[in-house]
Image: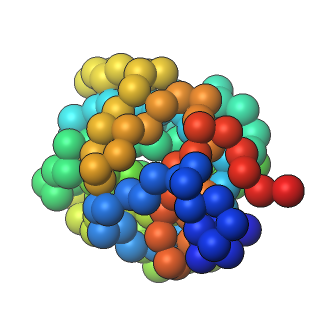
C-alpha cells in the first residue's frame, strides 16, 4: 500500500504523522492494526509486547523522544520478524542499524543510539499515545512507507 495512493483515494479518512521518522528495517512499506506501549529509556515492555501481540500488527512505541538509549536493536527486531509483526514505529532510537536493514520487518524511529536501554520493567501497554501531531489508538490502522505514516480509524485499502 503506497501512502501517496491512499491519500489520493482516502484523504478525508487519514491523519498524517508529522514527526520525522527514518526507516531502519528491511521492509520499507508496512501496515497493520496499532498496538501501543509507552516507556522511558526501558525496553522491557517493548520486548514483552513483541512477544505477545498478534502477527500482522504494528507496535507503536512512545519513548518520549529520548535519544539517550535505543529501545530496539537486532535481537528484538528478530523476534518481531519471527512472529510476523508487520512493523514497529518508535518515538525514540534504535541501534544495530546495519543489522536491522537485513531483518524483514518495518522499523521507523527518530534516530540511532548505540547505548542499550535499562531493564526495569516499567511502562504501560494498550493505551492511547500522542506524538507527531496524531493520536495512536490501539485497534486503529497504520500505513507506513518512505513517503510517510498515515493513521486511519479502520483499514481503508481494498
Identity of the residue drawn at 48% across and 31% down: 137
Q: Quadrant of the N terminus?
A: bottom right
Tell me residue 13's x, y (percent). Answer: 58, 50
Residue 154 visible in the current orientation: yes
Identity of the residue drawn at 31% across and 23% down: 123
Tell me residue 28's x, y (percent). Answer: 61, 74
Front one among 39 and 156: 156
Answer with left or right where residue 72 lies relative to residue 68.
right
Front one among 134 and 145: 134
Residue 43 visible in the current orientation: no
Front one among 153 and 19: 153
* 26 versus 36 height, above or below: below
Identity of the residue drawn at 55% across and 54% down: 12
Identity of the residue drawn at 63% across and 73% down: 8
Front one among 158 and 48: 158
Answer with left or right where residue 123 lies relative to residue 101.
left
Tell me residue 134's x, y (percent). Answer: 35, 46
Amino acid at each position: 500500500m503506497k501512502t501517496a495512493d491512499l491519500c489520493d483515494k482516502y484523504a478525508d479518512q487519514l491523519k498524517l504523522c508529522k514527526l520525522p521518522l527514518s526507516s531502519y528495517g528491511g521492509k520499507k512499506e508496512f501496515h497493520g492494526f496499532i498496538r501501543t506501549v509507552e516507556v522511558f529509556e526501558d525496553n522491557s515492555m517493548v520486548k514483552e509486547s513483541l512477544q505477545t501481540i498478534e502477527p500482522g500488527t504494528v507496535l507503536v512505541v512512545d519513548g518520549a523522544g529520548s535519544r539517550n538509549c535505543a529501545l530496539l536493536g537486532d535481537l528484538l527486531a528478530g523476534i518481531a520478524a519471527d512472529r510476523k509483526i508487520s512493523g514497529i514505529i518508535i518515538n525514540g532510537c534504535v541501534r544495530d542499524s546495519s543489522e536491522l536493514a537485513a531483518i524483514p520487518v518495518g522499523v521507523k524511529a527518530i534516530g540511532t543510539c548505540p547505548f542499550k536501554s535499562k531493564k526495569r520493567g516499567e511502562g504501560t501497554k494498550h493505551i492511547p499515545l500522542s506524538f507527531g501531531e496524531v493520536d495512536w489508538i490501539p485497534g486503529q490502522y497504520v500505513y507506513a512507507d518512505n513517503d510517510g505514516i498515515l493513521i486511519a480509524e479502520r483499514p481503508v485499502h481494498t
